[in-house]
Amino acid sequence: MSDTLAGALSQLKKAASYTDVPDEVLEALSFPKEVLTARISVRMDNGARRSFEAWRCRYDDTRGPTKGGIRFHPDANLEEVVTLAFWMTFKCAVANLPYGGGKGAIRVDPSKLSRRELERLSRAYVHAFASMIGPDRDIPAPDVYTNAMVMGWMADEYSSLVGYPCPAVITGKPIPLGGSLGRDGATAKGGFYVLNNLLAEVGLENCERRAVVQGFGNAGATIAAMLHQDGWKIIAVSDTGGCVHDGCGLDPQKLAEAKKEHGSVIGYAKGVSGGKVTTMERDEMFALECDLLVPAALEDQITKDNAGAINASVIMELANGPVTAEADKVLEEKGVTVIPDILANAGGVTVSYFEWVQNRQGFYWTEEEVQHKLRPIMDRESAAIWRLSQKKSITLRTAAYVLGLERIAEAIQAHGTQNYFCP
Ligand code: GLU
């Protein structure tokens, strides 16, 4: 078992120790319900056939159809997919959505494919997993290196397989194909609501408002822009190309332009702000003194090796699993507050749920209606998790797992447990 999956399951055990959830419920949540591995074969532009390994996992569907993204990444693997599906199960429960958790991936570097190859690969994924997905069974969405365009191809492919338009099979689609307004920025927006809801509680109300953002994809770029607009100073940002730092603050708009022009935020350092900008390595960036650190890239970034040097008061996890279980302990000892992924980035799947609801009712909402429905969910669940952490003297992560576990356990127990059948 990978360390990441073991860490996730250890979190379940830890949360369980603060509840009276029966062992049979924990046993049910310790294994994925369904996993499918497929080898997808695609015709490349040069005429040759190439095959790619792909997976989909439906971890638990007691609370409803499974929900979770599909990532295209060269390091994707089965255990990562299972771990991400486990996290989705708890994330959907924390946001109190009528969903279980799922996840999928293709082991591929999409930057090495042409657009036509990418379309063929996306459609081939749907063919391979058509028996597993479905609007009432398992509903994919975007994840690392997949986007609205990919979701549109996938929905279209599924629709041609079943013979009628079926937008509710997938979320995060382009707006003209049944996407929801507000889905694009939803992950960051949800995090922003959570942060503002807990600002005083986590001691950031009167801070200097210095933020560091790791990752400049959908979530990272959007949160950087939102924080900047709210008066935060974005002192460092990174992407796969490297990290740029300016103690006086970076301009997210110009970072986005630099990324577009040079392929990386590192392009920002090329003269944009008259030599104040420096570049640095990831761990050096993590060690910068700041009030808020937002990992918004991949899992396993803050580990036992670099956690000790973290100089942030609060970490808000917009990525899934950026802090390892071992690093979590180090951070707790250091007094760094971690706002956990299953709360902080739940805005994405929440607006995905709204998209699915709109597709099913065929009645679409304005952007204001979407925000009007998203905010109360993020506010309510962050307040509940904060209260639980105070009441039981546990971290916000453990409190989030306790809340999620209690909700999932309630659903599992509603079918009857040993106590019911053999009192
Ligand atoms: N991939 C996103 C996540 O990890 C979104 C999932 C969804 O919208 O279903 O939360």
Image: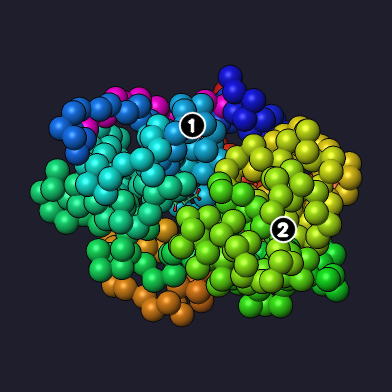
Q: Which mark is residue 291?
A: none
Q: Is residue 399 left or right of residue 263?
A: right
Queried whether the magenta region covers residue 232, the answer comes back as no
> According to the image, label 2 marks what residue?
278
Question: Which residue is pictured at 39% across the width and 27% down the height?
Answer: 35
Q: Is mark 2 within 8 Å of ligand 1?
A: no
Question: Which residue is pictured at 75% across the width and 60% down the height?
Answer: 292
Q: Work out whether 306 lies above or below 362.
A: above
The image quarter in which residue 363 lies: bottom left
Q: Secondary structure at mark 2?
A: strand
Q: Secondary structure at mark 1?
A: loop
- Out of 260 and 195, give the one closest to the viewer: 260
Residue kind at label 1, given as amino acid type: Asp
Label 2 to label 1, Cα distance in Å?
29 Å
Question: Which residue is pictured at 31% across the width and 63% down the height?
Answer: 174
Q: Residue furthest left?
A: 163
Sequence-wise first label, 2 or 1 = 1
Q: Is residue 60 visible?
A: no
| Magenta-tinted stretch | 30-42
